[in-house]
């Protein structure tokens, strides 16, 4: 098979994707996909340019490292076809498949799956599009059927719908109820007693580690949020039979002992949405992560599942009161204002947390990479602890010097606004008009097809085919329009922050900046979208600031997606 210019075989990219972490770790499904694609490419005479894999990536989004690599290769030219084993490997949303197909067509590249059912004719594409919509509908039905089945089991008091049972519990032999696992429940009681005695979460974490108590998954160090969730969970707080009876169905209450005590495992409290996002890594590349959004459901939708309880209620309530107040007695004197909390990012890409150490009666405060040995993640990241006072002083000296000139604030945030509005597009307003016109055109076509069918000019089958094509185009247009409007909204928020900052500091004498509290400085950093990364020679700072007046339009270290000033701010890390 020759290329379009008659010189050699056509070049292809092999693309494989799996959606779950289990598949990503085993690698079996990826290997199977790549092997099938290699055989097809060899049989058809394709020259394989590159094999691209997306382990553990959802098909509900196009923001995947492997897919970005494919799109970059296609944009570079010379690619005849991108191959995948199944159409849903490209994306599970038909609108995204359509978007990729149109994007690749601009570079004379075809999108092909081994399970394509149509050909390159308009009729063949329509066939694939209709079958994709039917597959999407069937997946939605299966998801909804599964959800309703799980809700029915939970309302019957069966907790075996949430996977691994919580720490301190195991499933019974019938797998339809929880029983207390004594070795782990003794650890749970120990956690509550330490918290009730006034120990903070860090102290509880340290004592569990010193005692050699692993987590349920065998990790040597308990995550602080894991300890907090144990203390806050209603599963360990005893409730009377009367309290439980008001929360569960009558048939569930009838199976309980009126003289017993029960904890509550809640189900259906939150609606969780997971999506993939990508962002600049500050070094000219991109980093990818999963972003989960939690929305609380109305309380009348919560479902209570009774579980055995064995801890004293007074102990649980006292531990909750001390931890929930945020100032356990042992740690109260260590409380401080962490000016850069949430804004320190390690060079490995992870956000940095905070840590307090005590030596000879003195307390020392650090920002720590969550993958570093200092966070007991031995061998994963070589970043040393960063002394909090040093980095906070260095960053504030740098930022306050820039803040004394309001022109720098306005110029820097205006740059962020422009980047947010453009987001890689030449004319956002023109793009919005374009997609609005496409949506209006789809509405017009929908009405026209329905009128033609009503007049007897086309059959119901033909109408269904036409409407499926219109709905696919309309879905892509609506998704693009929503993304554009979201960026416009973000630009308006940035503009409001800019105006608030400029107005605030225009009325502030330079000396007053030195008197801002840590929380006030942190608020300023948030509005400037500041990010600080430790560097061997100091600290790299990026955000919405400009180093000169707007007339000069000069910015130091301007790289993709962020503005870095100088190579770094000098300062030690110890």
Image (cartoon, helix red, strand yellow):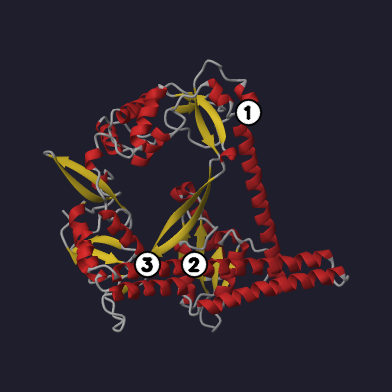
Please identify the quadrant where the N terminus is shown.
bottom right
| Residue 329 position within the rendered picture, expressed as x and y whole percent measured from the top left | 26, 34
Q: Which residue is mark 1?
A: 249
Q: Is residue 438 left or right of residue 193?
A: right
Q: Which residue is mark 2?
A: 489
Q: Which residue: 46% across, 69% down? A: 492
Looking at the image, is mark 2 or mark 1 nearer the viewer?
2
Q: Which residue: 52% across, 54% down? A: 32
Q: Secondary structure at mark 1?
A: loop
Q: Secondary structure at mark 3?
A: helix
| Residue 213 position within the rendered picture, expressed as x and y whole percent measured from the top left | 31, 31
Tag count in the figure? 3
From this view, report whether residue 92 is shown above or below residue 221. Answer: below
Q: Is residue 273 left or right of residue 126?
A: left
Spatial CA distance of label 2 from label 1 is 45 Å
Label pair 2/3, CB-CB below 8 angstroms: no
Looking at the image, is mark 1 or mark 3 nearer the viewer?
3
Q: Nearer the viewer, residue 98 or 355?
A: 355
Splitting the image into 4 quarters, where does residue 335 fall? Answer: top left
Q: Earlier in the sequence, mark 2 or mark 3?
A: 2
Q: Secondary structure at mark 2?
A: helix
Q: Which residue is mark 3?
A: 500
Spatial CA distance of label 1 from label 3 is 53 Å
């Amino acid at each position: 098979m020759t290329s379009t210019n008659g010189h050699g075989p056509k070049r292809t990219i092999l693309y494989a994707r799996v959606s779950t972490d289990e598949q990503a770790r085993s690698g079996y499904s990826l290997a199977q996909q790549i092997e099938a694609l290699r055989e097809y490419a060899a049989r058809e005479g394709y020259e394989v340019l590159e094999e691209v894999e997306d382990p553990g990536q959802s098909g509900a989004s196009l923001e995947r490292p492997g897919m970005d690599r494919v799109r970059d290769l296609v944009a570079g030219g010379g690619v005849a076809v991108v191959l995948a084993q199944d159409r849903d490997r490209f994306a599970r949303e038909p609108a995204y498949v359509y978007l990729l197909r149109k994007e690749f067509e601009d570079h004379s590249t075809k999108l092909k799956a081994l399970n394509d059912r149509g050909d390159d004719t308009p009729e063949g594409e329509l066939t694939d599009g209709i079958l994709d919509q039917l597959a999407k509908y069937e997946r939605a039905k299966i998801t909804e059927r599964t959800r309703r089945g799980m809700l029915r089991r939970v309302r019957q008091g069966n907790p075996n719908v949430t996977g691994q049972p919580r720490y301190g519990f195991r499933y019974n032999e019938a797998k339809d109820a929880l029983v207390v696992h004594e070795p782990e429940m003794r650890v749970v009681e120990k956690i509550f007693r330490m918290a009730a005695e006034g120990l903070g979460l860090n102290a509880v974490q340290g004592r569990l580690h010193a005692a050699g108590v692993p987590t349920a998954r065998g990790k040597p160090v308990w995550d602080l949020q894991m300890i907090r969730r144990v203390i806050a969970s209603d599963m360990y707080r005893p409730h009377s039979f009367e309290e439980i009876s008001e929360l569960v169905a009558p048939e569930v209450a009838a199976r309980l002992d009126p003289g017993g005590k029960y904890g509550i495992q809640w189900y259906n409290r939150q609606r969780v949405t997971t999506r993939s996002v990508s962002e600049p890594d500050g070094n000219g590349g991109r980093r990818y992560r999963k972003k989960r959004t939690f929305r609380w459901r109305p309380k009348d939708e919560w479902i209570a599942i009774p579980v055995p309880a064995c801890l004293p209620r007074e102990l649980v309530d006292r531990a909750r009161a001390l931890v929930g107040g945020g100032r356990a007695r042992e740690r109260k004197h260590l409380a401080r204002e962490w000016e850069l909390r949430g804004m320190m990012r390690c060079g490995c890409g992870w956000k940095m947390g905070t840590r307090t150490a005590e030596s000879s009666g003195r307390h020392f405060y650090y920002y720590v990479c969550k993958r570093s040995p200092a966070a007991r993640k031995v061998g994963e990241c070589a970043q040393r602890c960063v002394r909090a006072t040093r980095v906070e002083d260095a960053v504030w000296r740098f930022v306050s010097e820039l803040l004394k000139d309001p022109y720098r604030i306005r110029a820097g945030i205006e740059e962020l606004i422009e980047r947010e509005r453009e987001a890689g597009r030449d004319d956002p307003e023109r793009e919005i008009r374009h997609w609005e016109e496409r949506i209006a055109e789809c509405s017009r076509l929908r009405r026209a097809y329905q009128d033609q069918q009503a007049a007897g000019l086309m059959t119901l089958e033909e109408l269904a085919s036409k409407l499926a094509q219109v709905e696919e185009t309309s879905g892509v247009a609506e998704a693009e329009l929503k993304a554009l409007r979201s960026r416009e909204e973000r630009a308006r928020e940035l503009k409001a922050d800019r105006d608030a900052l400029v107005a605030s500091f225009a009325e502030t004498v330079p000396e007053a900046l030195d008197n801002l509290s840590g929380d006030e400085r942190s608020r300023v950093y948030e509005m400037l979208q500041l990010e600080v990364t430790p560097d061997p020679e100091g600290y790299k700072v990026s955000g919405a600031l400009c180093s000169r007046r707007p007339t000069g339009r000069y910015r130091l270290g301007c790289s993709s997606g962020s503005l870095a000033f100088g190579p770094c701010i000098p300062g030690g890390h110890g």
